[in-house]
Amino acid sequence: MNFSNMTMIATAAFGLEGVVAAELKRLGMKDVRGEMGGARFTATVEEAFLCNLRLRSADRVLMVLGEQECRTFEELFQFVKTIPWETLLTKDGKY
């Protein structure tokens, strides 16, 4: 997986989405846009760590591994199985 330009989501409490988006822009993140539940942006792994340390109004920073509309648990389960986990984690699970 290419870790240089990943889509991330900084989650936030209802009503703070714009505040989080403004903080991300001040930190120099790219493609920032507020959405329900937080703000989406593009970042490297290093930038994501920086956001985790410096964001004051966000709850957490999450990496988007894939997106698909799922209406049942089985659809969600099948979708999660398609994510290339071997490119994200080592065999010993340390990274």
Image (tube, rainbow, N blue to C red):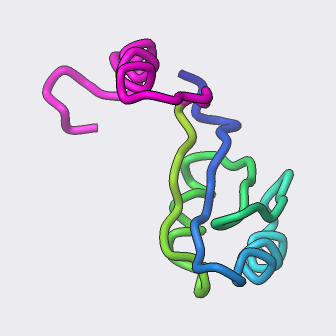
* Relative image position of residue 10 (x, y in whole percent): 61, 64
At x 55%, y 47%, the residue is 45
Q: Residues in magenta?
A: 66-95
Q: Is residue 44 magenta?
A: no
Residue ranking furthest to the left: 92
Q: Give percent across and percent down for residue 48.
A: 57, 57
Spot occupied by residue 28 in the image (x, y as percentages of width and height) = 81, 66
**Residue 67 picture quarter:** top right
Report the magenta stretch's main SS.
loop
Count the marks.
0
When asked about the image quadrant of residue 86, the answer is top left
Q: In the picture shown, does residue 29 fall above or below 56?
A: above
Indicate the position of residue 49 as horizontal and vertical percent values.
Answer: 51, 61
Residue at 82% across, 78% down:
22
Nearer to the camera, 45 or 69: 69
User: Which quadrant: the C terminus?
Assistant: top left
Q: Is residue 19 above or below residue 91?
A: below
Q: Is residue 15 above or below residue 30?
A: below
Quarter of the image where one finds residue 58? bottom right
Residue at coordinates 53% horizontally, 28% vertically from top-left? 70
Q: Residue at x 36, y 20 (%)?
A: 74
Does residue 74 show up magenta in the picture?
Answer: yes
Q: Is residue 56 left or right of residue 15?
A: left
Query: Is residue 90 left or right of 87 when viewed as pictured?
Result: left
Q: Is residue 41 left or right of residue 58?
A: right
Residue furthest to the front in view is 72
Q: Is residue 35 left or right of residue 12?
A: right
